[in-house]
Amino acid sequence: MISFFRRIRQSLLGQNRYQRYLMYGIGEILLVVIGILIALQIDNWNESRKDREIEQAVLLQLQEDFRSNLTQLNRKIQIRKAIIESSLYILNATDHPEVANRDSLIARFSILLLDPTFDPIEYDLSSTGNLRLISNNRLKRLLSNWTSDIVAVQEIEQNWSRIINEQLITELNRLGVTRDLANYFANDLKMDWQLEEASETKRIPIGTARQEVSTAQIAESKVLESLVSLAITYNNGANLESETVRKRIEEILSLIEAEIH
């Protein structure tokens, strides 16, 4: 092909047809430019195709991860609702110890010892360069803000966790009901929201305290009354924040599903 064009140029020069030679030269340059542009377009198309393939793989992984996040979040919300319900029962028993049932009171305190913390899968798509591959701008923005979206929930959870470990357990130990709580927690507490259907729990013979603490003694603790009240405040606050996060996850999943081909 190159020799063919060379012969044409030599023929035009030999015939002193400089104007046609100039036109031919311009045409040859245009052909080269067009060829380069076509090659670049093909290369760009191939790169775009590869990016879309990677994007689909990323979207499928994100879909799986956010479904797991949603399942975990729903379980944490359910646990917090159980803590709030138990706290209300305990406060009522505090107000009316004469009609309160001790075993039920121990059961409710066992639920307060649960420490629900939302620990979702976190992402750093920016550092890997995968964030630029997300073509949906709304989805890209939500993924960029994901870490900051869960901060409010985690801060409330951490505060409640500290209260459990630093104050609630200390007061329960002082009253002398820790063995009763541990026995109920290990053998009787039903945690259907945490266990797989096929899982089985093994009973642990902890037993109850040798010197039983009465319902009245438990009800008279002003420290417990205050801590139980805080259990409602913190867990209700965490659930309110969790509802916002749940809506965010549902929107992310909806956008992902619309982008998956």
Image (cartoon, rainbow, N blue to C red):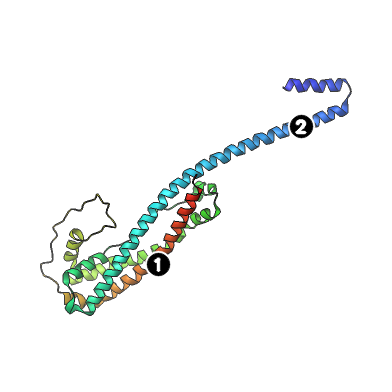
Count the numbered circles shown: 2
Name the front one of labels 1 and 2. 1
Structural crowding at the residue carrying mark 1, measured as other residues with C-alpha within 10 Å and reported as few (<14), some (14–19) or many (≥20) = few
Structural crowding at the residue carrying mark 2, measured as other residues with C-alpha within 10 Å and reported as few (<14), some (14–19) or many (≥20) = few
Q: Quadrant of residue 183?
A: bottom left
The N terminus lies in which quarter of the figure?
A: top right
Amino acid marked by disc 1: Leu
Q: Secondary structure at mark 2?
A: helix
Does label 1 or label 2 sit earlier along the sequence? 2
Amino acid marked by disc 2: Ile
Q: What residue is rendered at 74% in x and 20% in y?
A: 3
Q: What residue is rendered at 84% in x and 30% in y?
A: 22
Residue 74: x, y in percent?
36, 59
Residue 17: x, y in percent?
88, 25
Please give left or right for residue 159 compared with residue 215 in the image: right
Q: Secondary structure at mark 1?
A: helix
Q: Decide: is 245 above or below 26.
A: below
Residue 109: x, y in percent?
23, 68
Q: Decide: is 158 above or below 64.
A: below
The residue labelled by disc 2 is 29
**Any mark on residue 240, and which?**
1
Residue 216: x, y in percent?
17, 77
